[in-house]
Image (tube, rainbow, N blue to C red):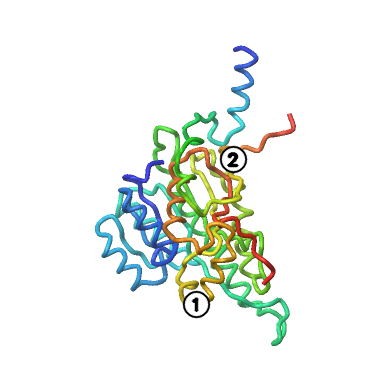
Amino acid sequence: MSPATQGISFRCRLTCFSRLSPTTPFLSSGRSQNEMLNGEVIRLDGAIRVQPE
Amino acid sequence: MEIRNSTFIVTGGSSGLGAATVEMIVAAGGNAVIADVNKAQGEALAAKLGRQARYTECDVTREDHCKAAVDAAIKGFGGLNGLVNCAGIAIGEKTVGKEGPHSLEKFARVININLIGTFNMIRLAADAMSKQQPNAAGERGVIVNTASVAAFDGQIGQAAYSASKGGIVGMTLPIARDLSRNGIRVMTIAPGIFETPMLLGMPQDVQDALGRMVPFPSRLGKPHEFAQLVRHIAENEMLNGEVIRLDGAIRMQPK
């Protein structure tokens, strides 16, 4: 396993669903269709809280 | 998680945000258990929606009622894939008012229904979900709670309500972490001012004034917009452990 792959694997374990996300959820149209979503920051992260290192 | 062919319990599902969520679930091809204390409205909604919806009487503070809601999902529809917690109450009372100190009984009642009732339903629904086979993505369930912008910007007279909703916000991440090994996601929506039965009971000029407080869109939120976000949360697997304000960017003033 290359260092880069190890890094990805490590980050993957940190997410609660233990996988990296494809871009599809980010591109989903649901947010743009909802007018009441405004001025808000939404974490799209599988409940990860990244540690200091 | 696809809504289609999935079964959800919706507490407070007889009216307002809960009823809109029930209608969304059924329209998307899912099944909904309407868990509510309001029997007449709940049964009427279930009758209107047909075989994909059924009503069960549910006081969320009671363990037997919440277990009955879970049983209604499993026995009636063959499983339980989601829970949407909409049941709640609101009161207005100052910490120290003209009549004296805040009623401790009323404070405890709001906490009991809004916060403890939400957790009561979560723990029992999650237990049932965790015993099911996961889908292809490893997911066994999704839970969506309802907080409020009052969790962050509580107004004068909202000590009890804000505390209860702040508790829901506070437990979202730890429960998401607890249930991550079970493949169950936990999210919370914090709505701003919405067209709920309580708001719609106010005079039109008051409703209009409240709507103008919202930066954009300058109007009250519609229950179907809440339901739309529930659907997006259900379908977007990477949303977990997060609280989303759905409020048109409003920040409530002290009064």
Left/right of residue B249 with respect to residue B182 in the rendered view: right
Please name the residue that numbered disc 1 is placed on. B202
Determine whether B13 is above or below B73 in the image: below
In the image as oriented, which residue stretches furthest toward the bottom? B99
Give the residue displayed 74% in from the left and 32% down from the top. A52
Give the image location of residue B146, x and y in percent. Answer: 52, 58
- The reply, left or right, for residue A16 in relation to residue B80 is right
Q: Residue at x 36, y 56 (%)?
A: B71
Work out which quarter of the rendered image holds the C terminus of chain B and state it.
bottom right
Amino acid type of the residue tagged 2 in the rendering: Ala
Q: Quadrant of residue B211?
A: bottom right
Q: Chain of mark 1?
A: B
Dot 1, crowdedness within 10 Å: few (<14), some or many (≥20)? few
Q: Position of residue B51 (x, y in %)?
A: 25, 57
The residue lying at 39 percent from left, 36 percent from top is: B135
Q: Residue furthest top?
A: A2
Q: Position of residue A38 (x, y in %)?
A: 57, 51
Callout 1–callout 2 Cβ contact below 8 Å: no
Q: Nearer the viewer, residue A47 or B213?
A: B213
Q: Secondary structure at mark 1?
A: loop
Name the image quarter holding the N terminus of chain B: top left
How many numbered discs? 2
Helix, strand, or loop for circle 2? loop
Q: Which mark is residue A47?
A: 2
Label 2: chain? Answer: A
Q: Spatial distance from mark 1 to mark 2, Cα to Cα?
A: 39 Å
